[in-house]
């Protein structure tokens, strides 16, 4: 698999982080409503998401627009 999906929840800060692949130097783009995209500074690729106040919202559906390509191993 080319990229791994890493999911981390910080209960004290109530922050959910979803990271795609290995960490890179990135910046955060505010999508509104406490949701942020992590964008690679060099390539402009989507590297993940951060959702603040996650537990407070977890009873509701959280929609994050993404497009992905899935590959299967032979």
Image: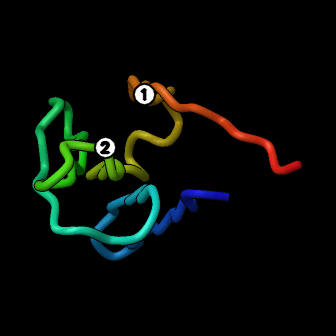
Question: According to the image, label 2 marks what residue?
Answer: 46
Lower position in the chain sequence, tag 2 or tag 1: 2
- Element class at badge 2: strand
Q: Residue 4, located in which quarter of the rendered image?
A: bottom right
Residue 8, compared with residue 55, is above or below; it is below
Q: Residue 30, located in which quarter of the rendered image?
A: top left
Looking at the image, which is closer to me, 12 or 41? 41
Q: Is 44 on the left-hand or right-hand side of 71?
A: left
10 Å neighbourhood of mark 2: few (<14), some, or many (≥20)?
Answer: some
> Residue 33's spot in the image, x, y percent?
20, 32
> Image point 67% across, 58% down: which residue?
1
Contact, mark 2 vs mark 1 (Cβ under 8 Å): yes
> Residue 63's spot in the image, x, y percent?
43, 25
> Residue 43's spot in the image, x, y percent?
20, 48
Task: Name the outermost residue toward the bottom.
Answer: 12
> Image point 53% across, 36% down: which residue?
59
Question: According to the image, label 1 marks what residue?
Answer: 66
Looking at the image, which is closer to me, 19 or 16? 19
Task: Name the outermost residue toward the front.
Answer: 74
């Amino acid at each position: 698999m080319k990229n791994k999906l890493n999911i981390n929840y910080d209960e004290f800060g109530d922050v959910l982080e979803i990271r795609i692949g290995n960490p890179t130097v990135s910046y955060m783009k505010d999508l509104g409503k406490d949701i942020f995209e992590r964008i690679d500074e060099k390539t402009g690729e989507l590297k993940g998401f951060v959702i603040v106040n996650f537990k407070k919202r977890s009873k509701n559906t959280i929609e994050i627009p993404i497009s992905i390509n899935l590959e299967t191993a032979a």
